[in-house]
Amino acid sequence: MISREARNVFRKYLRRLYKETPSIEIINELVVEKILSSCDAKRLRKIDEESERNFELIDILQKRRDEDIVQFCKILQDCDVQTVQELGKELETKLMKVIKTVDSNSGEASSSVNEDRIGADAVISSRIVQQTNPIDSSKNGNNSEPFDKYFRVIAGELRYDLAFRLGNTLRLKTNEIEEIKGTNSARYDKMYKILEFWKNERGTNADIAEVITALRSMNQNLIADKIQKI
């Protein structure tokens, strides 16, 4: 359940959320992230009036966890409309401030709250992935050729609206992701560039297992399986 502090921040943005949330465009992402149930999504899609649909969506979100609200903000930041992106970024910033304060007051490690939710899921799930889908470490390598085979598959098959989420999952710096977003490159090139940024940032420690784990945390198991079979 959303904390009182996060709810207070969220409610200050209700007017803008009712007006600006592109609910019909993000329903699928909310289901993928398990923020909405399939039943909720079906009900929302049946509402023709956007303001009414947004009202119902925001009502549902206020019954979710703080982490879900933060993830909702990240989904808004991936939308095409700049004002929606700015709304998501502004709301996330305000939410993270109060969440970190609550975390500090409760005596928990602040780093656990400051983690990106998906990135945290990827780290937590990595042991499970290793146990259920053993990853061949010999697929690593410091030259570009081995990684190029994997990158081409991901760039060619990952949905564009998930590309920048992958960058967040891999914990790339925000300015790097924003730089890629702002280019006029083709969809494939942007996604490939995100993966190149990741490889360059990790250097000799770059391990395709990290990307596979990130993809699985995003429920992109078909792509992850394809990479493991290369």
Image (cartoon, rainbow, N blue to C red):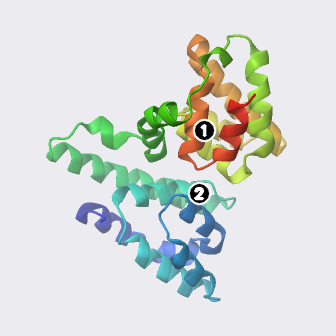
Rendered residue at 36%/50% (across/down) = 96
Q: Where is residue 169 in the image (x, y as percent from the top left)?
A: 54, 39
Q: In which quarter of the image is the N terminus?
A: bottom left
Q: Would you say 97 lies left or right of 71 here? A: left
Q: Residue 121 vs residue 160: left or right?
A: left
Image quadrant assignment for residue 150:
top right
Q: Where is residue 121 in the image (x, y as percent from the top left)?
A: 44, 43
Q: Residue at x 65, y 16 (%)?
A: 140
Q: In the shown orientation, is residue 222 left or right of residue 95?
A: right
Q: What element carries label 1?
A: helix
Asked if marks 2 and 1 touch (Cβ < 8 Å), the reply is no
User: Height in image: 225 above or below 99?
Assistant: above
In the image shown, does 34 or 189 lie closer to the viewer? 34
Q: Which amino acid does label 1 sit on?
A: Gly
Q: Where is residue 156 in the image (x, y as percent from the top left)?
A: 81, 41
How crowded pointer 1 is (Cα within 10 Å; few <14, some 14-19, many 20+) is rated as: many
Q: Identify which amino acid the numbered label 2 is placed on.
A: Gln
Which tag, 2 or 1, sits closer to the chain's start?
Answer: 2
Measured Cα–Cα span from mark 2 to mark 1: 16 Å
Q: Which residue is drawn at 73% across and 11% down?
A: 143
Point out the frontmost of discs 2 and 1: 1
Q: Is label 2 in a helix, a strand or a loop?
A: helix
In the figure, residue 64 lies in which quadrant?
bottom left
Dot 2 crowding, Cα within 10 Å, few <14, some 14–19, many 20+ = some
Q: Is residue 184 visible?
A: no
Tell me the tag on residue 85: 2
Tag of residue 167: 1
Residue 9, image x and y in percent? 33, 64
Residue 134 vertical position relative to residue 83 in the rendered view, above or below? above
Decide: is 215 above or below 134: below
Q: Can residue 27 be seen in this view?
A: yes
